[in-house]
Amino acid sequence: MNSKKIFTLLVLVVGFMTLSSCKGQAKNAAGETESSQETTANTPVHITKADFLKKIYNYEASPNEWKYLGDKPAIIDFYADWCGPCKMIAPSLEQLAKEYAGKIDIYKVDVDKETELAQVFGIQGIPALLYIPMTGKPQMLQGALPKDQLKEKIETILLKK
């Protein structure tokens, strides 16, 4: 079973929350990839495929088994600059990154610049948030949730409270 099938299955099992989301993707005319930013404890960190393979999950080396590489639970926000709902949740994610500094990591993946990551995870609507607990499988949820619901998901999925 390849990694695309695994994550497609994950998406189907978990289901998508479809509150408000952007469907489809705009094309990146330049086809450039963005350099990753250095990790800072209080802000979401933009990551590239190379960062993802090193810090989150190397689906090329272990395509059949999820092996989380991080040292704390994480959220990955799949977004695009042109997406209105993505812009709506960005301030909440920034606030939550400060509130949960040292407890969870929050990463951002621009689906227009990192098309392979978006394809591997079967992203068809954004924002899509991948919640990665330290143990167990990640959960993908779609839509622009309000901050209180994002916080509830962090508590129940990532911190298991």
Image (cartoon, rainbow, N blue to C red):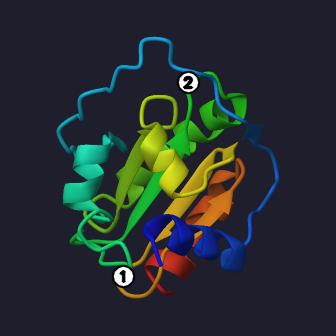
Residue at the far right in the pictured view = 19
Q: Quadrant of residue 139?
A: bottom right
Tag 1 residue: 65
Neighbourhood count class around disc 1 (C-alpha, 10 Å): few under 14, some 14–19, many 20 upward: some
Q: Are marks 2 and 1 in contact (CB under 8 Å)?
A: no
The secondary element bearing badge 1 is classed as loop
Q: Quadrant of residue 89?
A: top right
Q: Nearer the viewer, residue 147 or 13?
A: 13
Neighbourhood count class around disc 2 (C-alpha, 10 Å): few under 14, some 14–19, many 20 upward: few
Residue at the far front in the pictured view = 1
**Measured from the top left, where is residue 42 in percent x and y?**
30, 46
Residue 10 shows in this picture: yes
Q: Earlier in the sequence, mark 2 or mark 1?
A: 1
Residue visible at 50% across and 87% down? 161
Q: Is residue 4 above or below residue 80?
A: below
Q: Is residue 101 above or below residue 27?
A: below
**Measured from the top left, where is residue 130 in percent x and y?**
52, 62
Residue visible at 17% across and 38% down? 38
Amino acid of disc 2: Asp
- Numbered mark located on residue 76 in the image: none
Q: Is residue 22 left or right of residue 62?
A: right
Q: Nearer the viewer, residue 2 or 51?
A: 2
Q: Is residue 61 left or right of residue 43?
A: left
Cα distance in 3D space between marks 2 and 1: 32 Å
Given this view, does label 2 or label 1 mark the residue nearer the observer? 1
The secondary element bearing badge 2 is classed as loop
Q: Is residue 42 above or below residue 30?
A: below
Residue visible at 58% across and 21% down? 27
Amino acid of disc 1: Glu
Tag 2 residue: 81
